[in-house]
Amino acid sequence: MKRDASAPCQTSMNTGMAWSILTEIRTLLHQLAETGEPAAVDLRSIPLTTADRAQLEELLGKGEVSASLDVLGRTEVWETGYPGVWWVRHMGAGDQVSSEEIAITPVPDILRAHPVDIDAAADRLNNTLETHSKDTRVPGGHEEGKHV
């Protein structure tokens, strides 16, 4: 009897793992609904075959929200057909999947603006408005904030 030398995760055999993960997601989604506590399922740490991954993706479906980011590599994020359940896929060198998780949360952390970035944006917008108000007049004969 000859053994298959290919990596088990590369086979087209469906092992039923998608249903097990779906059961875990159900528990975590109830937890999120009841306590607000987010969670994640690291798909790279689970022995999924290619068929398992495709089945999980099909079972979860696609929701209305998706985003693509380019921060230290490309990241794809999409809400599944279940609000609060997000598929997050990070790509590495050669556009290969480097990490992949199902995030059970209202909004994945990677989509949240960092407080430091928000502060910098507020300063930048303030500077833009200050420069604009010094250089231009508002139509109607008024400077911004002053009557002439």
Image: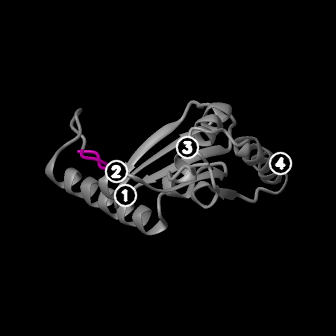
Which one is closest to the eye, mark 3 or mark 2? Answer: 3
- Label 1, on which residue? 92
Q: CA distance from mark 4 to mark 1?
A: 32 Å
Q: CA distance from mark 3 to mark 2?
A: 21 Å
Residue 147 at x, y percent in the picture: 28, 45
Q: Quadrant of residue 44?
A: bottom right
- Label 4, on which residue? 30
In the drawing, what numbered circle is on residue 95? 2
Q: Are marks 1 and 3 in contact (CB under 8 Å)?
A: no
Left or right side of 26 for 127: left
Q: CA distance from mark 1 to mark 2?
A: 5 Å
Left or right side of 57 for 147: left
Q: Are marks 4 and 1 in contact (CB under 8 Å)?
A: no
Q: Quadrant of residue 79?
A: top right
Residue 110 at x, y percent in the picture: 50, 56
Q: Earlier in the sequence, mark 2 or mark 4?
A: 4
Q: Are marks 2 and 4 in contact (CB under 8 Å)?
A: no
Q: Are marks 1 and 2 in contact (CB under 8 Å)?
A: yes
Q: Residues within 10 Å of mark 3 (few under 14, many from 20)?
A: some
- Label 3, on which residue? 11
What kind of residue is marked 3?
Thr
Question: Is 144 included in the stretch rendered in magenta?
Answer: yes
Left or right side of 95 for 78: right
Q: Are marks 3 and 2 in contact (CB under 8 Å)?
A: no
Image: magenta residue range: 143-148
Look at the numbered disc 1 and give the secondary structure of its residue. loop
Given residues 139 and 92, the one toward you in this image is 92
Main secondary-structure element of the magenta-colored stretch:
loop
In the drawing, what numbered circle is on residue 111? none
Q: Which residue is found at the position 68% from the left and 38% from the top?
A: 83
